[in-house]
Image (cartoon, rainbow, N blue to C red):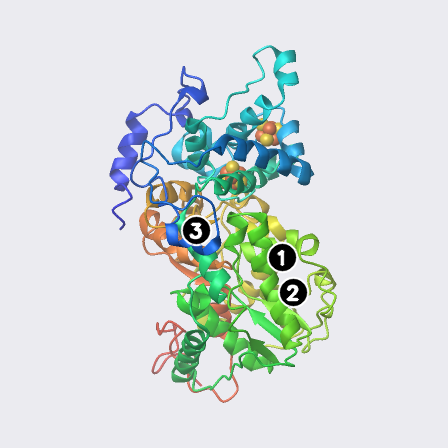
Amino acid sequence: MSKYVPKLSDLKKEFDEKPSVLKGNYSVQEWWDIPVEFRDGNWCFPGKPEVLEDLGFANPRKWAATDENWQLPAGWQKTISDGLQSRLKKYRSLKLFLDSCVRCGACADKCHFFLGTGDPKNMPVVRAELLRSVYRHDFPLVEKILKGFSGSRKLTEAVIKEWHMYFHQCTECRRCSVFCPFGIDTAEITMMVRELLNLIGVNNNWILAPVSNCNRTGNHLGIEPHTFVQNINSLVEDIEDLTGVAVEPTFNRKGAEVLFITPSGDVFGDPGVYTMMGYLLLFHHIGLDYTISTYASEGGNFGMFTSNDMMKKLNAKMYHEAKRLGVKWILGGECGHMWRVVHQYMNTMNGPADFLEVPVSPITGTRFSNAAATKMVHIAEFTADLIHHKKLKLDPKRNDHLRTTFHDSCNVARGMGMFEEPRYVLRNVCNTFHEMPEDTIREKTFCCGSGSGLNAEENMEIRMRGGFPRANAVKHVKDGHKVDSLVTICAIDRASLPPLMNYWNPGVSVYGLHELVGNALIMQGEKKRTEDLRENAMAGFGDGGDDEE
Ligand code: SF4
Ligand code: SF4
């Protein structure tokens, strides 16, 4: 385990011995009098100078959050103040969210970071207050009327440090907004503050390096087109070794019906690559006329964690590529924030994508009118539709070696309301599925603790703390139903949940949904299947097994 995470026994000791709001111990200090403490495990390394220079971002320099002097640029207060004013004019939502909180506290205990740390500044209401207090200071009328009780404060370097800490201990998951009677979306406040911080060069390398790579080469890892093709081709070879079936993806093929885009983690990262193998098997199984772009080689959009302008720019490349290749519509893989960007922002930001057609499944004839504006269909709904129309030959027994539960990825669940389609697919490709407790799934799902670009190594302690509520719900089904497989439809989850499970629930593995689809598909001309896509033995399919034909 990472050196940046404490032993479980130390965490328990700390919880038992230290006062905490979680146990009803309240500080006598006002929240804003409690200084931030950057220490190993609770902060991310800042953007490297060359990364900022590559992006043309402000104030490239070498620094660390633990430094006394953060080397902020001359006039930084005015930069922030002007930046806030211009965003308040541009985004009505921001003004609404800052003005309408009544401090009812309904959101206070809904954030996984608060539950994992007991830090009051991780209560969504207080997190937003970190900005609201400065916003109020810029409106002296409020201060005059309330005579010092408005809770306003000056923008100081200490406030910037606090913003950096706590707006990077928010994964923009929106769980708090589900419980707010006014629908205040703290995630949007976090997005705005991160955008302001970027104006003065306060940032994270784990976010900006992927943005820079994506900006340059089309994907987070900075992989060049030929390497991208090589990697997918090596997965094609693995598929043939395992199944005897030669799948044949095409790249940058003009005139294909569908452009398929997925997070690059599915092409390069373990366990995402097994999900990619599942997609390739599925497309071959149904004879889909699709192509993969080596330029729009990333569905993920870390621009969302940086600034709206960057989010817009990175999203645009997918649509430019669809136009260049002359496809009819886009099929998107298992990703979280890609879908939030497409579903919530794309149409007003980059759209409308009128040069594409309203997606129609070439196999079932289903018209995806829900994607009439974005022209982009989620792979889970595409596959659910195939299953519903009995277009797939599936043997769910091939997943009998797995006892599954399903983690709703925040952005897909709360960002686009997709709850049933992945469950429908999962129930059709495996026989053992148990839900986690009701208040931890669907729209109330708990974040993995590492979303919004926070899945770095150096902040592992805060990730393990923030992921605790999710892990606790998994433990519930692990203990009660012997669940050993956590299925998800998000590339960040596939990267971040394995260490979380290793820490809190050893023995639970993480799977993409389409990996299990790939296991279950009965492919035409396949050889006898005894192993899943990870080359693990399937239960009952070995030599002399019951299910052999
Ligand atoms: S958006 Fe998520 S991480 Fe951020 S304050 Fe709300 S619950 Fe916490
Ligand atoms: S639930 Fe909404 S109104 Fe109540 S404290 Fe939280 S953000 Fe404010």
Question: Does residue 108 show up?
Answer: no
Question: Does residue 327 show up?
Answer: yes
Which residue occupies the extreme top position in the image? 147
Q: Is the residue indicated by label 2 positioned so its CB lies within 8 Å of ligand 1? A: no
Q: Residue at left 31%, top 41%?
A: 41
Point out the frontmost of discs 3 and 2.
3
Q: Is residue 356 left or right of residue 240?
A: right
Displayed-image quarter of ligand 2: top right
Residue 110: % across, % down = 52, 35
Q: Is residue 370 left or right of residue 114?
A: right
Point out the frontmost of discs 1 and 3.
3
Crowdedness near tag 3: few (<14), some (14–19) or many (≥20) residues, C-alpha within 10 Å: many
Under mark 1, the amino acid is Val
Q: Secondary structure at mark 3?
A: helix
Q: CA distance from mark 3 to mark 2?
A: 32 Å
Q: Which residue is mark 1?
A: 342
Crowdedness near tag 1: few (<14), some (14–19) or many (≥20) residues, C-alpha within 10 Å: many
Q: Which residue is mark 3?
A: 52
Mark 1 or mark 3: name the one nearer the start of the chain: 3
Q: Is the residue indicated by label 1 positioned so its CB lies within 8 Å of ligand 1? A: no
Quarter of the image where one finds residue 466: top left
Q: Nearer the viewer, residue 193 or 156?
A: 156
